[in-house]
Amino acid sequence: MRSDGDAGVDTRLGARLAELRTERGWTLDELTERSGISRSTLSRVERAEISPTASLLNRLCHVYGRTMSHLLSEVEGESALLVRAADQAIWTDKASGFVRRSVSPPYAGLRGELVEGRLVAGADIAYDRPPVAGLEQHIWVLDGTLDVTAQDVEHRLDAGDCLRLRVWGPTRFRCPGPEDVRYVLAVVLP
């Protein structure tokens, strides 16, 4: 069951996704062709009947040419230059065990952002494409172990390790355990 806070974010997110589709003059069928997501799932997400997974949201971000942070910031309200810890938006993908804190959300005129990611032991998220081709990412593990696969190469990152890359194709984030992983993701638009 979703909390009232989750339901509010899902409602605003669904409305924004419907708005983006409408701005482009696309039907649900056209969006299905572009995203590879079923029409019924898209409809249920836009009506906030279901909460999108991280992978599904990534596919929609790719179609709309936005990072996940950019899309979420559009439904979370105005950003300030100083982002207090208490004001950092948190989004949870309960299906995958992924918790995402927007430490430094997108801001007009700035190309970078910081995200804190947490994956429970055993969590595995696969993204079939980057939200924006050539997106620069720096993944710094704070606690635990994270396996990242990019360009068909798997990288094992332990606490303190940092992986730097540009994302052109599929990626995968997996927490092999036994403990959860916490990491910082610095994202820079090309």
Image (spheres, rainbow, N blue to C red):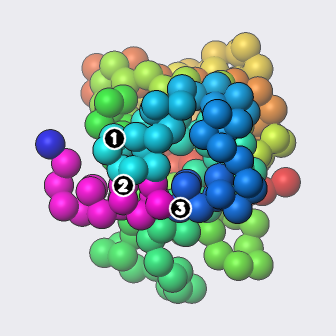
16 relative position to 23: left or right = left
Q: Label 3 is placed on what type of residue?
A: Arg
Q: x, y (%) of residue 43? A: 47, 41
Marks 3/2: CA–CA distance: 10 Å
Q: Which residue is mark 1?
A: 50
Three-letter amino acid code of the residue under disc 2: Asp
- Look at the image and say whether residue 66 sits in the magenta stretch: no
Tell whether position 9 is magenta: yes
Image location of residue 34, percent across then percent down:
73, 33
Between the residue at mark 1 and the residue at mark 3, the CA separation in whole angstroms equals: 15 Å
Highlighted magenta segment, given as a residue range: 2-15
Q: Amino acid at mark 1?
A: Ile
Q: For residue 104, which quarter of the picture?
A: bottom right
Quarter of the image for the C terminus: give it: bottom right
Left or right, 20 with reference to 176: right
- Residue toward you, 175 or 75: 75
Q: Earlier in the sequence, mark 3 or mark 2?
A: 2
Whole-angstrom CA distance, mark 1 to mark 2, is 8 Å
Q: Is residue 92 left or right of residue 134?
A: left
- Asked which secondary structure carries label 2, the reply is helix
Q: Are marks 1 and 2 in contact (CB under 8 Å)?
A: yes
Q: Quadrant of the N terminus?
A: top left
At x 65% / y 75%, what residue is drawn?
107
Q: Position of residue 117 (x, y in %)?
A: 44, 46
Q: What residue is rendered at 36% in x and 76% in y?
A: 87
